[in-house]
Amino acid sequence: MNVPRHSQSAEVARVAALQAEFNEKRWVWVPDEKEGYLAGWVNQEDEVTAQVVMSAGGEIRRVPLYALSKMNPPKFDRVDDIADLTFLNEASVVHNLRLRYGSGAIYTYSGLFLVSINPYQNLPLYTDAIIQQYRNKRRDENPPHIFAVSERAWVNMQNEHENQSILITGESGAGKTESTKKVIQYLSAIATDAHPPGTLHAHSPSIPSSGFPRGTSRRKSVSFAGSGDSLTAKGRLGLLERQIIQANPILEAFGNAQTQRNNNSSRFGKFIRISFAPDGSISGANIDWYLLEKSRVVVRSPAERNFHVFYQLLSGGTPLKDSLLLDGGIEDYEFLNRSKREVDGVNDRDDWDTLIVS
Ligand SMILES: Nc1ncnc2c1ncn2[C@@H]1O[C@H](COP(=O)(O)OP(=O)(O)OP(=O)(O)O)[C@@H](O)[C@H]1O
């Protein structure tokens, strides 16, 4: 985006002023129970402690030297890659991530890695236009994004003729499942793009989500294979691309559940493998799943639910419900009625419809 000239000079002046103020003092990060870290400057110090004047409010604190972290100059604020920081300490990393998150930048690089902070709201970051923005671009040509990581994997696969892996990790509710969907969304869109112009037109699918998961302690898998071309002439995603995307509501229905940390928590691990043909189109896909939390079927915390599919079936599953002789509601079944039954923002009936379509 082109920044108007006067804004650029105002920004330069602002940074210069901050820099001048920064140069005057010895700035540090001070650990704080409530805020994590607070900014301050060292007024005096002896061999083991420092007297620090807190930036907000001017309060004076005496802090052990070992607890202080050096602060980076203001020109490093909101830096795209944490690895670029001069002082690479936890406080500076947290400060940078916090500043970026506050301005809607949920993605930040950390060397080869991408750090993603869950925004808990739908941001306009995954549109067709954004996909095109990352297509055929180097990492440093755009702001950090999961699409840049996906693009890199795609390019490496084509250039090096080697399989590529993207490892997505984090605590429950961090956004792993959503990130996985974004990777598939990107690869599906650009793989479709790989067809000759005119045979199809790419649009980015948004990946549906519904019920919940699957799993057993043994590894299980589902595969798709065949030609992805059959629907592309109609300007839609190829069959395989759609199959991969539509597998999600099924996996989530049988394998995900509402927990205290995440309304749609995956209760199993999964390994998704997508195969590409030499022309760049998707030629097959395979999803392995493992370590399903089977005990959830019979016991769970009262504040959590069983796997989504049970509630979906009972809310919207007629006539299957009838043929299974299930004539009651959630309240009539012991495996369901001893814990939470409904989740805010989740419509089990709609999710059942999505599951059946998938
Ligand atoms: N990029 C994002 N944009 C908008 N909302 C998001 C994003 N990432 C995560 N969320 C929100 O956070 C919720 C939890 O994310 P997700 O299910 O991906 O976590 P997870 O790491 O897979 O958790 P678990 O390990 O429990 O399965 C999502 O249901 C969604 O509401």
Image (cartoon, rainbow, N blue to C red):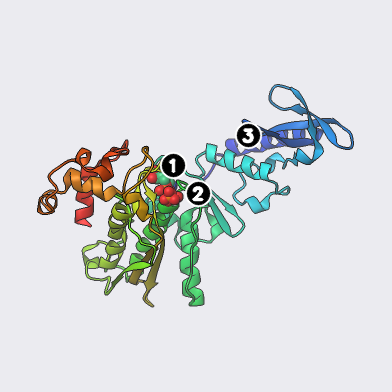
Ligand 1 lies under 8 Å from the Cβ of mark 1 = yes
Foreground: disc 1 or disc 3: 1
Front residue of 65/289: it is 289
Q: Which mark is residue 216?
A: none
Q: Residues within 10 Å of mark 1 (few under 14, many from 20)?
A: few
| Residue picked out by circle 3 | 10
Residue 358 in the image: above or below residue 329:
below
For the residues labelled 2 and 1, the Cα–Cα distance comes to: 10 Å
Q: Secondary structure at mark 3?
A: helix
In this picture, residue 88 sits left or right of residue 108: right
Q: Residues within 10 Å of mark 2 (few under 14, many from 20)?
A: few
In this picture, residue 35 sits left or right of residue 326: right
Residue 144 in the image: above or below residue 29:
below
Ligand 1 lies under 8 Å from the Cβ of mark 2 = yes
- Residue at point 64%, 41% (across, down): 77
**Quick one: label 2 or label 1, which is nearer the N terminus?**
2
Residue type marked 3? Ala
Q: Are marks 2 and 1 in contact (CB under 8 Å)?
A: yes
| Residue picked out by circle 2 | 171
| Residue picked out by circle 1 | 261
Asked which quadrant contains residue 293, the reply is: bottom left
- Residue at point 14%, 48% (across, down): 326
Residue type marked 2? Glu
**Quick one: label 2 or label 3, which is nearer the N terminus?**
3
Residue type marked 1? Arg
- Residue at point 67%, 52% (across, down): 84
Q: Secondary structure at mark 1?
A: loop
